[in-house]
Amino acid sequence: MIWLEIGIIQRALLGCVLAGFLTGLIGVFVVRMRLSAIGYSMSHGAFAGAALGVAISANPLLTAMLFASATAFLIGPVADKARLHADTITSIAFPLNMALAFAFLTLSPEIGLSSQVASVLWGSIISMTNNDVVYMITLCAATLAITHLIWKELFAIMFNRKLAEADGINTRPIIYLIIFLAGVVVTFSLKLVGGLLIYALLFNPASSVLQFLEDMRKVMIVSPLIGVATSVSGLMVSLFLDLPVGSCIVLVSTAIFAVSVLLSPKRRRKMENERR
Amino acid sequence: MDPIIRLEGVSTIYEGERRPALRDVNLNLERGELVYVVGPNASGKTTLLETINGLLPASKGKISVCGLDVQTQGRAVRCEIGYVPQDFMVEPGEPYTVLDVALMGRYGKIGLLHRPDEKDREKAMDALRLLDIDGLAERPMGKLSGGQQQKVMIARAIAKEPKVFLLDEPFSNLDPESRTRIPELIAHLHEEKALTTIIVTHDIRKMLRQCRRVVVMSNGRILVDETPEKALVTLQSGSDTLLMEANQ
């Protein structure tokens, strides 16, 4: 029995490390390319998809991925073509996805607030399977390979998309690729913190690191490490205090962000400049 | 010889606008020509540059640069253009060094899946050296003054080794000494490398000394395409006249 528990905790820990790493890495692109509104909508798209999976007794991971990808593929080009403001995208997509999620969850009343539904809502790291771990390791490798291959283009787009385009870089497919990758990462990280809170893990580590570092290469290294530290600390806090893992991870990551903003030398310099 | 830049009846409308920002513009530039574009605010100067490099799609007409159709081969065209945008400022705290920014100018030419090598870095450093800012190469871009940042943007365009230079108010934030030196440097590069150059400016005195051709724009139209002396006469007739003429 004890070996079984150790196995569960080991998988949970590995899941935390991998999800923290992935969200911390992809979060840098999301924040720097100003894709936060799309990332936010997509996380809730994944949540709605997972809810549908639970309702129709399909694999929630698969339906979550389908919904996240569909949201990404719809929102990315639509926002691009219609020149919609980020706020508009979020304002429409968030309630829509929430409405869909809750509608799906009530499709099969016998499901109610079962453990499967709860895991979609709040995450359930202890239900992490060996397959989940293998998927996440593969996703980590793929994300790192893509980042390495098109780093130059990503670096230029994160600086300024219009200038990158002026330099002859085809920015649109690269941005769509990042949106799609973010969707996949969100889907695979749902078990960690759940559909309602996953966005914090995508946004907070990168935003915290950007308060201090002035070299994008270092940001790309430190942000995933902060993501890992946040997830693992959150897991530990949850084990000690017997609180939900997802909530603890988000509380830890928000605390790190708050402290980063308080100590941020960049923010202080900006304030000093404004005073002058 | 075919012109290196050719615009035939080009109009550009911003999305959501009804009035074109550029209206039926015809403009030809031979290889190695230097042209100053002047005109009142919102006369279409920036739109003209962004339409030439394909950042803004033309709603009407034909544009070719270096023999390539901008509408269908925009990316290849942009690889040959060194573009300096107007009033580009990097916020303090942005995680990019001066060398990073200068080197980015070469990214389009290096191509997808390739990394900049030592030669590329050397070219970026040479460009920074030309503008006397090589000592700032490792400094964060956001910590530089407006004038220094403008020099980095010019260095970035030079590092690209383009065939065409499109410079939008490139001297506006420079200190007095640089305001004399940098235009001379651009004129020198243009002569030495036969770079076809379009400079949008408000500084009419510069254009009198450095070029043989001036384009005066108003309300999205080219009003005058003449020698600097003749263009000056038009400009001195006042902006009201320019507006009236453009509306005709």
Image (tube, rainbow, N blue to C red):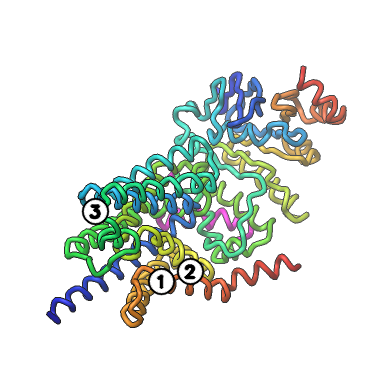
The location of residue B36, given as percent across then percent down, is 70, 34
The location of residue A51, given as percent across then percent down, is 30, 52
Residue beneath disc 3:
A110
Residue drawn at point x = 45 percent, y = 35 percent: B76
Name the one closer to the observer, A39 or B158: A39
- Dot 2: element: helix
Residue beneath disc 1:
A226
Q: Are marks 2 and 3 in contact (CB under 8 Å)?
A: no
Residue A209 numbered tag: 2
Residue segment shown in magenta: B109-133
Local crowd size for mark 2, using a 10 Å CA cut-off: few (<14), some (14–19), many (≥20): many
Q: Amino acid at mark 3?
A: Glu
Distance, label 1 to label 2, CA atoms, is 8 Å
Local crowd size for mark 1, using a 10 Å CA cut-off: few (<14), some (14–19), many (≥20): many
Q: Which quarter of the rendered picture does the N terminus of chain A lie within?
A: bottom left
Provide the chain ID for the residue under circle 1. A
